Image (cartoon, rainbow, N blue to C red):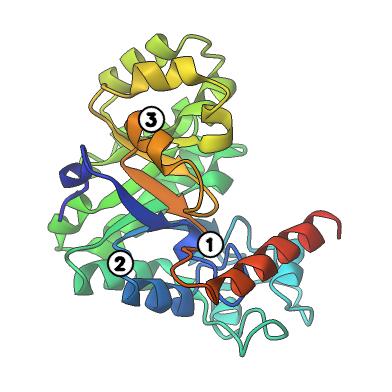
Amino acid sequence: MKVQDLVGQYHYGMRALGAISGTYHTNTLEGYRHWGSKGIRFWETDVAVSADGRYVMIGHFLDRETMRRMEITDLPDELTHDWYMRQKLFPRSTKGLTPLSLEDIVRFALDEPEQCFMLDMYPFSLGDSLQKTTDFLRCLTDCVGIHAELYDRIIVEAYNQEMLQALHAFSQIRNIQLSVSHFMENEGVRDIRAFVDFARENGVTVISYEWRYAREHIDHLEVLRDCGFLFVSRSVTNCFENGKKKKYGVNIALLDYYVTKPTDLFALARLFVSRIQQKHG
């Protein structure tokens, strides 16, 4: 399966590799295995940089605040790659979840040729985006190595023009994604048709839109619907508005949790509680 094979279809994908046991935004091995066993084949995962300049999957920063959310409180002075990879995440809420690195994601892509992976690089959009994105793409290139076919199944996301500039320097990247609402805000683009023209001129093949904002901009959806991009909706559950998403051309509905049986509702309730607790400290 290639990314472009998904245009014109409707699938579920998991945000941050999927919530598990009432946790969220985990980017963990257990989430990947659990939802993979349920048939999920499209994955969004978050990339962050460690204190020693390596890349781990965590949303969105390998910092003290994020680690406390993930129930890790005994923190060293520097949060390095090797330190993070030794942790068991969410030890109070679960039996402990296994962290992942960029190398792990590339290995998953090699092992599962029917899966696609979307790399969310939000942290690199904040200050010196050109250099941060360039550094990451060099590492991704090293990880992929001779397996150039993986680029058909890997999406790299951009949030501003500097990130796009970095991506254009790596011609092997075949699927560039723009986050519509973020990009329009970051670059001061007001007209959705101007956004579409810009995206086409800059080799963008995938767009994403937070559904809560999309509902407020039906005019945007009307324009985006038939533009030929792979259209990813950022979502929470699969319980709401599937018909409307299909109507407006969404191809991938990203979920935190996919409710498949009544007992899943308990985990979903825990997920909502954990979000409220995180929001209010």
Q: Give the amino acid type for the residue marked by disc 1 in the picture.
A: Gly
| Label 1 SS | loop
| Separation (CA) of disc 3 from disc 2 | 23 Å
| Label 3 SS | helix
Q: Quadrant of residue 172?
A: top left
Q: Give the amino acid type for the residue marked by disc 2 in the picture.
A: Val
| Upstream in sequence: badge 3 or badge 2 | 2
Query: Where is residue 50 drawn, in percent x and y?
Result: 58, 65
Q: Residues within 10 Å of mark 3 (few under 14, many from 20)?
A: some
Q: Nearer the viewer, residue 188 or 163?
A: 188
| Upstream in sequence: badge 1 or badge 2 | 1
The residue that disc 1 covers is 53
Confirm whether residue 22 shows in the render. no
Mark 1 near mark 2, Cβ–Cβ under 8 Å? no
| Upstream in sequence: badge 1 or badge 3 | 1
Mark 1 near mark 3, Cβ–Cβ under 8 Å? no
- Residue occupying the far right of the picture: 281
Q: Nearer the viewer, mark 1 or mark 2?
A: 2
| Label 2 SS | helix
Q: Residue at x 18, y 42 (%)?
A: 4
Q: Give the amino acid type for the residue marked by disc 3 in the picture.
A: Gln
Query: Where is residue 129 drawn, in percent x and y?
Result: 52, 37
- Residue occupying the far front of the picture: 262
The residue that disc 3 covers is 165
Q: Residue at x 79, y 54 (%)?
A: 279
| Separation (CA) of disc 1 from disc 2 | 18 Å
The residue that disc 2 covers is 106
Up-down relation of residue 24 to residue 193 (above or below):
below
